[in-house]
Image: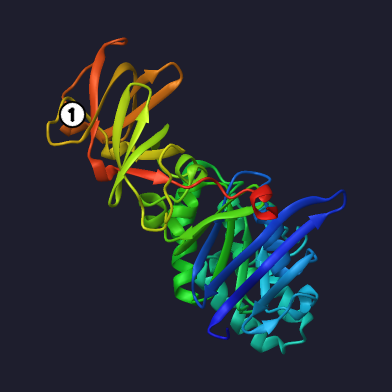
Amino acid sequence: MAEFDVVIEHVYKTFPGDTRAVIDFNAEIEHGEFVSMLGPSGCGKTTLLRMIGGLEEVSAGHIYISGQDVTDLPPSHRDTSMMFQSFALFPHRTVFQNVEFSLKMRGLEKNLRARRVWDMLDTVGMDQLSDRRPSDLSGGQQQRVALARALISEPTVLLLDEPLGSLDYNLRQTMMVELKKIQQETGITFIMVTHSQQEAMSMADKVIVMSDAMVQQIGTSRDIHENPRNQFVADFIGNNNMFKGVIRSRSGSMVFVEAGEQLYYIRVPEHIRQVSIGQEAHFSVRADLMNTGDNPEMANKVEGTYVATEFLGTLETDVFELDPGHFVHVEQHRHLSDSTYRVGEREILCFAADSGMLLEKNQRPEDLAD
């Protein structure tokens, strides 16, 4: 266990009124990893972060930091530091004094404090603004000061609660790169809470996807993007098209799924051990694996009605409606597409057999109880 900076074993959090905020959370976080906990508001990710930092009590389970059980220890006895979305800087102190504060409280000698503060300000690019107060800084500059203050104590783990949430789009894009760069330079383990798919997938080495107070999937950004385990992850991550039907037969690692008058040939991931003929099934197909036009090499074909085109840089996404309320997105590079559709025009959509992925049901509290 000591090889992991953080180990979380069967952790639960129940608030008064029997409100379950975190249910059976398990994770192992290696030294130097950048981990993101991703999910919608109210899924339990911030509560879990606060339990790691000792700001919330654990109802059941254990939390280990560097091999030590810290479940019942106060924040001051845990080798963690926390950076809040609000930054929480002292308004009457300068940049230098804000960063120096925790070292001063620990009684470090003045010259040693100064040397460490200057090194940290240089790391975050704030050494030229050391005598300014927070009110004289931009949002991005305040964030850098907050980050320097959190890192100055050289914690084993830095906890970040929506660190980019208060920044505008362009500054957020810049700070995502800066934050990842600083994490790599310091080698400190970062655990970040966010509801932004882009932030999590861009920065994190490991992503923990949560909903309904439970972990739905843990993996690398690529693994979660390319191999979503269940309906929630497929719907929440990436640009996935969702389908529902009934399994009619199975042949090895493939199944036939009947949806209305359509029959689809779909891949069964290795982690799904049991597939019952006649059961309802959900599967997803990434938008970039869908194709327009009749392609005889692809096993699955369906006809849809053109609705709209969404443009994003060099990519464009054509939207088709298969049935009332069931929309399918086809994503492709603009220079590869020479099709111009009229609203209401019919088009054949197709995808390969291994592009569709059978999905598990979402992890739910009632299933755990059973």
Residue sitting at the far left = 296
Answer above or below: position of 279 versus 99. Answer: above
Q: Is residue 85 left or right of residue 17?
A: left
- Give the image location of residue 152, x and y in percent: 63, 76
Answer above or below: position of 296 versus 46. Answer: above
| Amino acid tagged 1 | Ser
At 22% across and 31% down in the image, what residue appears? Answer: 334
How is colour applied across the structure in the image? rainbow
Tell me the quarter of the picture where residue 130 sits: bottom right
At 66% across and 78% down in the image, what residue appears? Answer: 64
At 79% across and 64% down in the image, what residue appears? Answer: 59
Answer above or below: position of 269 versus 102. Answer: above
User: Which residue in the protein does label 1 denote?
Assistant: 337
Nearest the eye: 214 or 69: 214
At 49% across and 46% down in the image, what residue appears? Answer: 233
Quadrant location of the N terminus? bottom right
SS label for mark 1: loop
Nearest the eye: 337 or 121: 337
- Give the image location of residue 27, x and y in percent: 57, 68
- Give the image location of residue 255, x and y in percent: 32, 43
Q: Is residue 254 visible?
A: yes
